Image (spheres, rainbow, N blue to C red):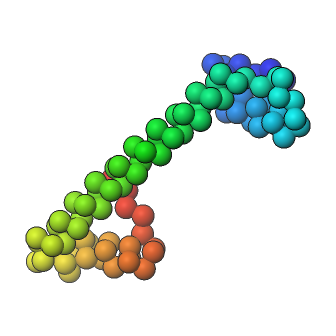
Amino acid sequence: MSTSYEADVVAWANEQASLLRAGRFELLDRDHIAEEIEDVGKSEQRELASRMSVLLAHLLQWRYQPERRGSQLGKDHRRAAQGDCLWTE
């Protein structure tokens, strides 16, 4: 095996997962694994902050622009209340 992290991160990740499952801990690329785990946490924090900003903007529009409630904004809120909608930027 021995796929380079820099050459192909997807193949590298699959290889690291296989090594973990096989208990071949001595062959793991620990530094890059730690880096990837940290990056996932940062990415999740950014995503949460982004979604919270969008939610806040929608709630403010809902509160202060009642004339738009029949528009797409209102439809988004109703779908979100039913759990059918993920707001994206």
Percent x, y for residue 21? 84, 40
Q: Residue at x 26, y 72 (%)?
A: 72
Looking at the rendering, which quadrant does residue 26 occupy?
A: top right
Side of 19 relative to 70 (left or right): right
Assign the N terminus to one quadrant of the image: top right
Side of 21 relative to 12 (left or right): right
Q: Is residue 82 above or below residue 19?
A: below
Percent x, y for residue 48? 40, 51
Q: Is residue 68 above or below residue 20?
A: below
Q: Residue at x 77, y 25 (%)?
A: 28
Q: Residue at x 47, y 40 (%)?
A: 43
Percent x, y for residue 51? 36, 55
Side of 81 relative to 38 (left or right): left
Please state which of residues 48 and 3 is positioned toward the viewer in this rendering.
48
Q: Is residue 46 above or below residue 15?
A: below
Please state which of residues 6 and 32 is positioned toward the viewer in this rendering.
32
Side of 54 relative to 2 (left or right): left
Q: Residue at x 58, y 27 (%)?
A: 35
